[in-house]
Amino acid sequence: MDEEKRKIPYPAIVMGLGIILILTIIVSFFLGRFPISPGELFQILFSQIFPIEQTWTVQMEKILFNVRLPRILLACLIGCSLAAAGAAYQGIFQNPMAAPDILGATSGAAFGAALAILNDGNNLAITLSAFAFSLLTVTVVYLISKKAKGKKVLGLVLCGIMVSSLFTAGTSYLKLVADPNDQLQAITYWLMGSLSGATQKTVLMAFIPMAIGLIPLFLLRWRINVLTLGDEEARTMGINPARLRFIIIMCASLVTAASVSVSGMIGWVRLVIPHLARMLVGNNYKHLMPATMLFGAVFMLLVDNISRNLLQTEIPIGILTAFIGAPFFVYLITRKEEAF
Amino acid sequence: MSIVISNLCFSYGERLVLDNINVTAEKGKLLSVVGPNGVGKSTMFYCILGILNNYKGMIEIEGRDIRGLDIREMAKLIAYVPQNHYPSFNFSVFDMVLMGTSIQVSSVSIPGKAQMNLVYSALERLGISHLKNRSYTRISGGERQLVLIARALVQQTKVLILDEPTANLDFGNQVRVLTQIKSLAKEGYTIIQSTHNPDQTFMFSDHILAMLNGKVLADGVPSDVLTEELINRLYVVDVNVQSLFRDRVRVCVPKSVINDKR
């Protein structure tokens, strides 16, 4: 986006996104098959702090705290994480099309999840296995790329594609040998992505690694600007490109692994949201990172609301994000104006 | 004596790219490195900048042997102005120049008032304050080059290295950029640039280093060393060097052109 055309100042944009996020969260509490009125919602919420006479049913309170609240929080956390990871990857690879998939974070997670499902693991086992394989894949890619000759960034990307395709083939093999009556369905459904498994426990489990990854991404955000200029220039300005890239890859991969391990494959958010945020606030990561994080949370929450309320059965969120993401991608590559 | 290079040798594998280079760049002088493409100019720059460090010989900047200095220490000694380019992501001119302050802020913080003031004064120094909110990719090549110079200035080093600062610029921009570079040298900066244009060297440089096949062919004041014979050896073109305005300026004209006009 051209710097000159932007009229809305950055603080207003971030505040606007924050307000939209809060409103979306409030609205999301009311959406669902079980109707809860605004009065009841606030009574239930306040009853946690002040003693209020109970006029609502226990079922209502359970739905609110055990179903809707975790799901809303998880959607926000995942949207924020995936979008932030996407923006970080685009910067450190100097490529507007880069996404965390490049280093195999998602294909590794898919393999890990499929492996756990094949071994009749419970939800916790599936999540842990997806998380572990996701990080394992990225680590393998990173270590192999260190041996690669020539340009470092290109070496990383090529290693990522290779290792990724290996794990994708592995997942296909696991699907082949899976029991078609239940396991294959479970794997396929997992790959489509969904937040329906959200519980208080999954939220907490995802939150810790996400916080560990998101905080450094946020703090280091201004430095990412310098890395987008390329290694040599960054070096002459006093920044160690290899070290900074390593830290950012680890943080972005950590939050990606945490996200996909609880939600399955949710594509596009990490490509689409950073670009929408770029259009709003420009490419300076000082502004881009906070805007991307907020935007990602809003987007994911909105899409998840559609996913769980549009039809009688839930639409996997991975399908919905692709439906929105693919046309946007086409728009990006065909628009006349210089996009990046 | 701001940069002293002694017995510098560098090879990519078996191929010797720099063969025993000795040169001294003095404070307040503009040193132009000339020579055909692929002669080792960029390799030499990368050695001086500390990007390549498996060289033989010694490079001293402001009295310090740079071998073994870490990236931050190097960036405090010397700033680099790359050829004007299109980055992957577009930034405003202000944000682009601000990046030069990286060493002044800790890794987890963001430049503040002091750094922003440096940016304002660098933009003003180069006469491009009016561009500060413009988009870096939407300004002219000459303006982009000045922006990159401003970025090097906010790094607050006394030594600058410029890689063909006038490449791909139109005539007016070439003159404007070189005039600024020259005046920075007069202010006390030590500047090394690479260039391909002998006329420019006559007009702006205080000192030239002519390189061919990784060796130093000539080193001295342009009017002394940049002779018809040297230009012929460097670029394999027969030229006639003419003196103008009582030898305040020299120009270099290919002989084939003179013969054609007869």
Image (cartoon, coloured by chain):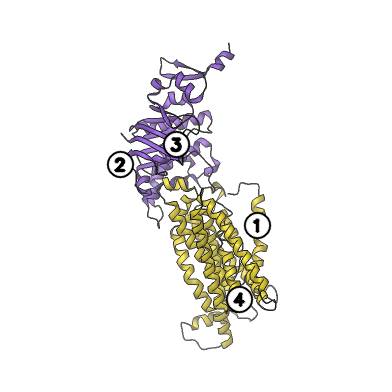
Q: Which residue is mark 2?
A: B64
Circle 3 residues within 10 Å: few <14, some 14–19, many ≥20: some
Mark nearer the viewer, 2 or 4? 4
Q: Colour of chain B?
A: purple
Closest to the observer, B104 or B238 = B238
Q: Chain of mark 4?
A: A
Q: Amino acid at mark 4?
A: Ile
Mark nearer the viewer, 1 or 3? 3
Q: Secondary structure at mark 3?
A: strand
Closest to the observer, A52 or A112 = A112
Q: Is residue A296 left or right of residue A215?
A: right
Q: Which residue is mark 1?
A: A328
Circle 1 residues within 10 Å: few <14, some 14–19, many ≥20: some
Percent across and percent down for residue A267 are 61, 63
**Residue A56 shows up from this direction:** no
Q: Amino acid at mark 3?
A: Leu
Circle 2 residues within 10 Å: few <14, some 14–19, many ≥20: few
Q: Which residue is mark 3?
A: B16
Q: Residue at x 57, y 70 (%)?
A: A112
Q: Which residue is mark 4?
A: A117
Percent across and percent down for residue B251 are 47, 19
Q: Secondary structure at mark 4?
A: helix
